[in-house]
């Protein structure tokens, strides 16, 4: 994929998975492997560098699951202060001039072609700085940021939603329609995971 070597991946896996009773969402099965490993392998196959995984209370099982892969684990010691704080922690380890694909582990059913579509959109759009995949009008993940977004993210409080920055970038926010329900399938509860898995299985997304 053109330009992928100029792009870093930031995989967010620092939460406590409290709505799963403490079972790490990152280790839920997807396509014969765990969600976090599937995401990491897609990013590595696309040539992203570095591939950074931000971890919190489930560091050890996630590190074990990612053994043998060329990823960098970053500890978010203050993960409980807010999701944005964990993003900031991972972003600080990425070279400042890299574009970044942010991919939370609670979106493990995204098709690889969607990541390729984000990269292709970036290659043909020199004005956009924030690329968001959409499915049936709803925005989802992963998103792609250019370096212009970086400082604004660092200026946020750890518990402030990153989406609060969207109005600031206005027309530089690009929404990319994709035929991929995985971008909006947020598996934050067991019911949401079962529904997303059934939909993915029916579509045979690979």
Image (cartoon, helix red, strand yellow):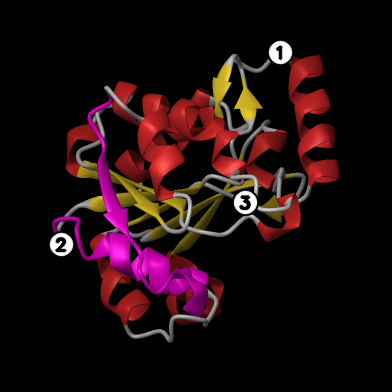
Question: Residue 91: within the magenta?
Answer: yes
Q: For this rendering, which residue is in front, 44 or 130?
A: 44
Residue at the (55%, 40%) spot, across then down:
26
Residue at the (14%, 56%) spot, across then down:
95
Residue 91 rendering spot, x and y as whole percentages: 28, 62
Quadrant housing the C terminus? top right
The answer to whether 46 is drawn above or below residue 24 in the figure is: above
Marks counted in the figure total 3
Please tell me the numbered disc located at residue 87.
none
Q: Secondary structure at mark 3?
A: loop
Residue 13 rendering spot, x and y as whole percentages: 47, 51
Residue 126 visible in the current orientation: no
Does the CB distance between marks 2 and 3 fall below 8 Å? no
Sequence-earlier tag: 1 or 2 = 2
Mark 2 Cα-neighbour bin, 10 Å: few <14, some 14–19, many ≥20? some
Residue stretch rendered in magenta on the structure: 69-95
- Residue carrying label 3: 140
- Residue carrying label 2: 96
Q: For this rendering, which residue is in front, 147 or 188?
A: 188
Q: Secondary structure at mark 2?
A: loop
* Res. 192 image quadrant: top right
Mark 1 Cα-neighbour bin, 10 Å: few <14, some 14–19, many ≥20? few
- Residue carrying label 1: 204
Q: For this rendering, which residue is in front, 74 or 104?
A: 74
* Res. 158 image quadrant: bottom left
Sequence-earlier tag: 2 or 3 = 2
Sequence-earlier tag: 3 or 1 = 3
């Amino acid at each position: 994929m053109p330009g992928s070597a100029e792009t870093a991946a930031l995989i967010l896996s620092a939460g406590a998975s409290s709505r799963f009773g403490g079972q790490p969402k990152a280790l839920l099965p997807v396509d014969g492997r765990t969600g976090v490993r599937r995401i990491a392998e897609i990013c590595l196959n696309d040539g992203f560098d570095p591939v950074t995984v931000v971890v919190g209370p489930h560091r050890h099982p996630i590190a074990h699951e990612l053994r043998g892969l060329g990823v960098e684990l970053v500890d978010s010691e203050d993960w409980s202060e807010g999701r944005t704080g964990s993003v900031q922690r991972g972003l600080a380890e990425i070279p400042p001039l890299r574009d970044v694909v942010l991919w939370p582990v609670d979106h493990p059913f995204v098709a690889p072609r969607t990541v390729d579509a984000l990269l292709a959109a970036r290659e043909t759009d020199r004005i956009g700085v924030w690329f968001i995949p959409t499915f049936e009008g709803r925005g989802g993940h992963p998103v792609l940021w250019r370096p212009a977004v970086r400082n604004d993210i660092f200026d946020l409080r750890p518990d402030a939603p990153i989406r609060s920055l969207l109005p600031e970038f206005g027309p530089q926010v690009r929404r990319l329609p994709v035929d991929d329900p995985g971008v909006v399938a947020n598996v934050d509860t067991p019911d949401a995971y079962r529904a997303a898995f059934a939909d993915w299985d029916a579509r045979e997304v690979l």
